[in-house]
Image: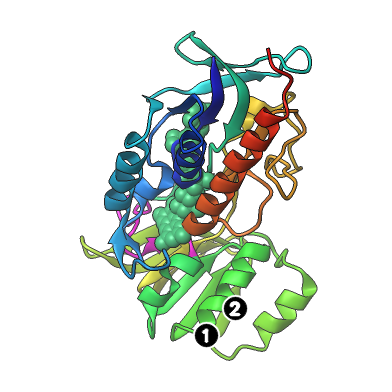
Amino acid sequence: AFDVLVIGGGPAGAAAAIYAARKGIRTGVAAERFGGQVLDTMAIENFISVSHTEGPKLATALEQHVKEYEVDVMNLQRAEALIPASGPGGLIEVRLANGASLKSKTVILSTGARWRQMGVPGEDEYRNKGVAYCPHCDGPLFKGKRVSVIGGGNSGVEAAIDLAGIVAEVTLIEFDSQLRADEVLQRKLRSLPNVRVITSGLTTEVHGDGTKVTGLSYKNRNTGEVHRIDLEGIFVQIGLVPNTEWLKGSVALSPRGEIEVDARGQTSVPGVFAAGDATTVPYKQIIIAMGEGSKAALSAFDYLIRMAPV
Ligand code: FAD
């Protein structure tokens, strides 16, 4: 059995594994895809002290750093169920899709999240070539350009306000007949001269020239008319979905499906900690996920040294 078993191999999981292994305890990582969302990222310019890097490069560095320690890395392994220990000092079990079952004194959940996609033609083709999901990450790449934000909930309106200070103009497109963001955000949005809001708009296609985005089409849901906007960037803000479906019923989740954690990364289940985009911790960023992963590992170690000897 492991002392610490980490589920997920993104920035949070890698940091948790390194911090745990540095305590000299038996550490394992099971990940469906080691590297996580970082593998899907091109330019990274907000990883403090590294002014520019690329996702695949950072993912390789994460894996190399983990492998410098005695960590049992189980890549391409999907966890399907978590079974809490039967009593104090017992082992927690994680069942994998391949039928195997792993046991550990503590578990750190760091299965991350995925951005909900529009599912329209051109979106996949132009991802990272104008189609973006993270304004904190990619906003500055569109300085002085025209962008659109898809989604009029809190994250969409926050993104539009944020981007309005950087880009030339922002067109926010909301599917519903009205914005769903908090009133105070909507008021701020309406005060900005370079933001246009379109409601009852359904994005139908992302256009490009083969290498980058050049525009988008949307349908007015009231009239059925299709309009085309010329622009350079599209920020999709229609939801970040935590990869926690497999934990329903075993660990307390927020209404949005995020794993509820306290300030130490402790979940509702004794010995089970969580970190990164899968949790209720706000602001989903690489540097935050790494900090939270390190914290969860230190909390797990703290838990272990208080366990009755077996
Ligand atoms: P993830 O990176 O999502 O990793 C989750 C891990 O868990 C993966 O290994 C996954 O395979 C695994 N997993 C999931 N489910 C299971 C399961 N059931 N069983 C086993 N393993 C599982 N952040 C920045 O700070 N700067 C940027 O420039 C930036 N750009 C981004 C660009 C894009 C296109 C995207 C999508 C995100 C970007 N982000 C950026 C956000 C950043 O990537 C995330 O905040 C960060 O990766 C979260 O780390 P994590 O470890 O919590 O989760």
Residue at 61% x, 88% y: name it: 192
What number is the disc on residue 161? 2
Left or right of residue 243, residue 43 in this image? left
Determine which quarter of the picture holds residue 127.
bottom left
Estimate the spatial distance between the alpha carbons at disc 1 and disc 2, rounded to whole Å. 7 Å
Determine which quarter of the picture holds residue 62.
top left
Residue farthest to the bottom, as pictured: 193
Residue at 56% x, 23% y: name it: 3
What number is the disc on residue 208? none
Whether residue 226 is visible, yes or no, is no
What kind of secondary structure does the magenta stretch mostly adopt?
Answer: loop
Residue at 75% x, 42% y: name it: 254
- Relative to the observer, which residue lies in front, 51 or 119? 51
Q: Residues within 10 Å of mark 1 (few under 14, many from 20)?
A: some
Q: Amino acid at mark 2?
A: Ile
Quadrant of the rendering where the N terminus is positioned? top right
Q: Position of residue 31 (x, y in %)?
A: 44, 30
Q: Residues within 10 Å of mark 2 (few under 14, many from 20)?
A: many
- Relative to the observer, which residue lies in front, 41 or 216? 41
Residue farthest to the top, as pictured: 99
Residue at 75% x, 46% y: name it: 262
Quadrant of the rendering where the C terminus is positioned? top right
From what the image shows, is residue 245 above or below residue 65?
A: above
The question of residue 158 being in magenta is answered with no
From what the image shows, is residue 148 above or below residue 86?
A: below
Quickly name the residue at label 1: 165
Q: Position of residue 299 (x, y in %)?
A: 65, 40
- Is label 1 in a helix, a strand or a loop? loop
The answer to whether mark 1 and mark 2 are in CB contact below 8 A is yes
- Relative to the observer, which residue lies in front, 57 or 188? 57
Q: Amino acid at mark 1?
A: Gly
> Magenta part of the protein: which range?
122-134
